[in-house]
Structures are given as C-alpha cells and as structure tokens.
Image (cartoon, grey):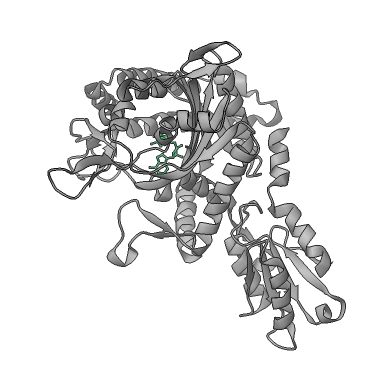
C-alpha cells in the first residue's frame, strides 16, 4: 500500500511537471480542492469529453445533447431534494482538529476487512500453487470466515444506520470498531453532524431584492427541467436520452485526494427516459454499455468492477457504481442509477406544470421513468492517468517514465522531430507538420538530443514520434518511433496520415461498443 501511495505522489508531481494539472491560485498558496488544467491536461480532458459525447450522442440515434446553465431557479433544488437531503455526515477528531466523513471512515474499515481476506488468499495461493481452490478456501478457512463475518456484520449495521439516518449510531459504529484518526491516532471523536454540500450565492443587485441561488451540485436537473422542451422540439419518442457535459460544485467536507474529490468539477451525465416498468431492462442495458465504454480503452479489464449501492438515494430503486483500481484502491468513477419518476414528478408538483409523455403506441400519457449514467470528467481523467503511468526499466539500466495513454485520448498524437537543426531538416519537418496539424494535435521539437526528445514525448503519452533525417530529403521517408514498444520503422510520408488516423480516431473503439 505504501508503495502505491508513493506512486500516487509521483503521479501528482508528474501532472504538475508536465502541464496536466496545477493547483488553483498557486501563487496565492492555492485553494482547497480546486485545480486548473494545463496545456496537456486540457487536451486530454477534451479528448475524454469527445469520446463520451460521440459514444453517447453520435452512436445512439435516440440520445441528444444539451447545454443548460449553472444557475437555475432555486425551487429546482427544493424539488429535487437537494436543499433538504444533499448532506454528508461529518465528524471531527478533537485532538487533531481534522474533519472526516463518518460514512467514509466506516467504508475504509470495511475495505480493511476485505484486504485481510485478500491477503490470506494470496498467501494460500502461493503456498498451494496450482492445486489451490479459491472458492473452497473462502468457504472453509477459519481466518477468512472470521474476517468475512466481521465485515458482513459491520455492513449490515452501517447500511441500517444510513437508511435510518441515524447519526448517533454512525458515531457508535466508529467507536465500536475502534476507528482512529490517522493523524492523532485517537478515538476522541465529536458528534456526527449533517452538512449540506451546496454552494450558494446571490442574484440581483440590492441586498433586499437579491435571491439566494445555488451553484448546481449536478448537471442532471438541467436535463429534467428541459425534458418537455427537448421532447417536443426534437419530436423524441420514449425511450430516448438527453446528455450533457458541464461544471458542478460541491462543498466537499474532505477533499484530500487530488482531483478525485474536488469542489468544482465536471460531469458527463445522461438521463434516459423509459416507459414505467421497463426501467430494469434499461438499467441493465446501460450498465453493460457503460462498462464496455470504459473497457474499450484497453486499460485492463481486471481494473474495473461494479459496486452495488448499500444505501439507495431517496430517488433511486437501483444503483451501481463502476469502480476503477486507483493507486488508493477501487474507487467510483461513474454511477448508474434508476431514478424512477421521482424527478419529473417532483418538478411537475413544484412548478405546477404537467410533465408527461403521450405514448402513441400505448395510446396513453405517463410520467417516464429515468435511468441515469453519471461520470465525473476529472475522475475519469485521474483513472486514465493512474492506469497509464508507468516507470519502466530499460536495457542498460536506464529508466523511463511513460504514459501509456490510449492513442485516442493522448494530448499530442504526433511529435515531429528534425534529427539536427540544420541541412534543411527543420524546414522539411515543418512541411510534414503542416500537412498533419489540422487533423492531429502535433508538436514540433528540435531542442536536445533525439533520445531526450523521445523521453519528453513518452512523459506526456505521445503515441508517435516522427524523425526527419537526411534520408528524408532523398526518398521522402521518415522514422516512426512507437511509444509503447519503442520500436522504429521507416515509413513513407505519404503513408503517415492513414497510419496515424487509424489509431487516433475513435472508430475502432466505437466498433467495440457496437459489438
Ligand atoms: P462520492 O460517493 O464519491 O461522493 P457520489 O456518489 O456523490 O460520489 P454522484 O453524485 O453519483 O457521486 O456523481 C456522479 C459522478 O460525479 C461520480 O461518479 C464522480 O465521478 C463525479 N463526482 C462526484 N463528486 C465529485 C467530486 N467532488 N469531485 C470530482 N468528481 C466528482
């Protein structure tokens, strides 16, 4: 684990050093859990958004996009339940004065039991080799059974406390489990209190007439309140979806894991409207589609898992998360929720407008049910970087840091490098660059040795480096060097475009999604 934390620290440093992510307002010592994306970060982020948008809106004929405002009428947040219920339970350690989320402390305790079980299994696997029967071991080994039963008991108690909204019981669980503050090492905890995560501001010029409004904590409500607009103007027929990418704001209590938990972040959400009673089949459909979307990137199927929710949100009748193996364990990247007709019904109630759909096939009107897919751009960004970051030992004892990014997402697709800075090579390199740059993001670099330039491109994940040398002037060929294998190949300039295009456009990934 310590080693993994080490990797995470290096990744954060790498993000800063290579222009991916900077702390916000850094020259003023930063602002808690707010970050800026640098010159490479913004490209990666835009590519992630494009991959999502194209997969959701272009690939699915019945999904369209919108872009709604961050500011919305405050009653929307009353109707959605956020004013009353968008809370996290917080707890302070009296000795360290550090603040924690009570639910997260308990979840971490659950993960510790899981770790213990996994350790027993790994140990036994090593000992018994090929003859090892994992299922039988899980069912019979006394150590595994003991940890598993402690875990199950804790989970049951935890889920009940959350569902009953029983804050005293959450505190009691923390005490009974002997959970200590990682800083002070003590169990000197305060009471657990609810904390609303929405930021507020004022709209209007005079203090009297100003209206308190919220910075949206999710983009979904902008979709719900535009349901009728889109359905009517787009002549959409249920089932259909509305997708949106945009900023969201949450005053997170604990924000310590870099861009995993930010106070200003970006979401990519889709609400899919279905006939009541058909929601479970669509829930399964979107679960499987979304997992395929992640796996198509080739970051390793074993790094993804579903995690069903122990406690359902007030609006949901089924919910699962897609988790990715981050350096600090499996963590949620995306949520898939069956939200029933809760949101549309609430908005109908609070606005006094009829929000229904007339289904010509059934010849009746109803309030559609909703399946939501909700993914954080920044968390996706972190998962991709965490999966791609590699420190590799090369022959001759050298090492390199390489980002093995999917080519579709790489910030720079192609580096154009004249071998030396004279003999007409820079001019030829510029020529090659000009034929490529309108279609692919290219970078020209003539400084330092070719080896150093390759390393710089490895560090930002550029899949192709093209070197222009003296032979290029004679036969119009270049050396293409591949990031992952570091192999080199002589290729004609005329063939470059097709070769690169095949790998960096999304077409191949989308084919996988359609299978
Ligand atoms: P968590 O349990 O981690 O607080 P959540 O269940 O509240 O997350 P959702 O409300 O389901 O999250 O939001 C959907 C997605 O938005 C999440 O899967 C995550 O990718 C992203 N997200 C939520 N909160 C944040 C945040 N503070 N910073 C970055 N991304 C976030």
Task: Examine the rendering and report whether any part of residue 513 can be seen.
Answer: yes
Tell me where residue 25 sits by quadrant: bottom left
- The percent position of residue 183, horizontal first and vertical second, equals 27, 46
Residue closest to the far left:
208
- The percent position of residue 348, horizontal first and vertical second, equals 36, 22
Task: From the viewer's side, name the closer residue of 77 and 321.
Answer: 77
Residue closest to the far bottom:
423
Instruction: Say which residue appears at 59% left-offset and 37% top-offset.
Output: 56
Vertical position of residue 279 compared to residue 106: above or below: above
Instruction: Say which residue appears at 51% left-offset and 29% top-offset.
Output: 232
- The percent position of residue 450, horizontal first and vertical second, equals 68, 76
Task: From the viewer's side, name the closer residue of 69 and 411.
Answer: 69
Instruction: Say which residue appears at 72% left-offset and 69% top-offset.
Output: 435
Give the quadrant of the C terminus. top right
Vertical position of residue 165 compared to residue 503: above or below: above
- The percent position of residue 429, horizontal first and vertical second, equals 71, 77
57 left or right of 264? Answer: right
Vertical position of residue 403 compared to residue 431: above or below: above
Tell me where residue 354 sits by quadrant: top left
Task: From the viewer's side, name the closer residue of 75 and 337.
Answer: 75
User: Which corner quadrant of the figure contains ligand 1?
Assistant: top left
Vertical position of residue 149 compared to residue 8: above or below: above
Residue closest to the far top:
363
Residue closest to the far right:
475
Task: Examine the rendering and report whether any part of residue 271 can be seen.
Answer: no
Tell me where residue 30 sits by quadrant: bottom left
């Amino acid at each position: 684990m310590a080693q993994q934390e080490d990797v995470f620290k290096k990744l954060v440093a790498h993000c800063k050093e290579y222009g991916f992510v900077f702390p916000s307002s850094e020259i003023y010592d930063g602002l808690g859990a707010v970050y800026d994306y640098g010159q490479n970060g913004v490209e990666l982020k835009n590519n992630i958004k494009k991959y999502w948008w194209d997969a959701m809106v272009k690939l699915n004929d019945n999904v369209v996009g919108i872009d709604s405002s961050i500011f919305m009428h405050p009653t929307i947040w009353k109707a959605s339940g956020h004013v009353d219920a968008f809370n996290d339970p917080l707890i302070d350690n009296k000795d360290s004065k550090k603040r924690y989320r009570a639910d997260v402390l308990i979840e971490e305790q659950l993960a510790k039991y899981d770790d213990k079980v996994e350790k027993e299994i790994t140990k036994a696997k090593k000992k018994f080799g090929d003859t090892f029967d994992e299922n039988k071991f899980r069912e019979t080994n006394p150590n595994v059974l003991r940890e598993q039963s402690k875990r199950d008991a804790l989970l049951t108690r935890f889920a009940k406390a959350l569902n009953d909204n029983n804050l005293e019981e959450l505190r009691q669980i923390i005490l009974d489990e002997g959970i200590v503050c990682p800083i002070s090492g003590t169990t000197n905890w305060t009471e657990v209190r609810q904390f609303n995560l929405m930021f507020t501001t004022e709209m209007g010029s005079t203090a009297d007439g100003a209206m308190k409004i919220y910075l949206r904590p999710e983009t979904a409500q902008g979709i719900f309140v535009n349901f009728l607009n889109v359905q009517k103007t787009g002549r959409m027929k249920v089932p259909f979806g509305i997708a949106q990418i945009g900023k969201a704001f949450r005053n997170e209590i604990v924000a310590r894991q870099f861009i995993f938990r930010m106070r200003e972040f970006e979401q990519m959400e889709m609400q899919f409207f279905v006939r009541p009673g058909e929601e479970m089949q669509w829930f399964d459909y979107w679960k499987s589609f979304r997992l395929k979307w992640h796996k198509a990137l080739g970051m390793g199927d074993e790094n993804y898992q579903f995690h069903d929710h122990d406690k359902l949100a007030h609006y949901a009748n089924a919910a699962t998360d897609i988790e990715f193996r981050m350096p600090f364990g499996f963590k949620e990247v995306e949520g898939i929720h069956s939200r029933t007709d809760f949101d549309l019904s609430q908005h109908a109630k609070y606005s006094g407008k009829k929000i229904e759909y007339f289904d010509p096939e059934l010849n009746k009107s109803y309030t559609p049910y909703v399946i939501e897919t909700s993914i954080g751009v920044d968390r996706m960004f972190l998962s991709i970087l965490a999966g791609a970051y590699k420190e590799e030992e090369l022959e001759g004892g050298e090492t390199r840091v390489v980002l093995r990014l999917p080519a579709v997402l790489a910030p720079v697709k192609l580096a154009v490098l004249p071998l030396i800075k004279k003999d007409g090579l820079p001019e030829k390199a510029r020529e090659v660059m000009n034929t490529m740059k309108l279609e692919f993001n290219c970078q020209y670099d003539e400084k330092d040795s070719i080896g150093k330039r390759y390393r710089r491109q490895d560090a930002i994940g550029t899949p192709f480096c093209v070197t222009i040398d003296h032979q290029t002037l004679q036969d119009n060929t270049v050396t293409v060097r591949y990031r992952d294998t570091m192999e080199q190949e002589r290729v004609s300039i005329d063939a470059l475009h097709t070769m690169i295009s095949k790998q960096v456009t999304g077409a191949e990934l989308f084919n996988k999604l359609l299978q």
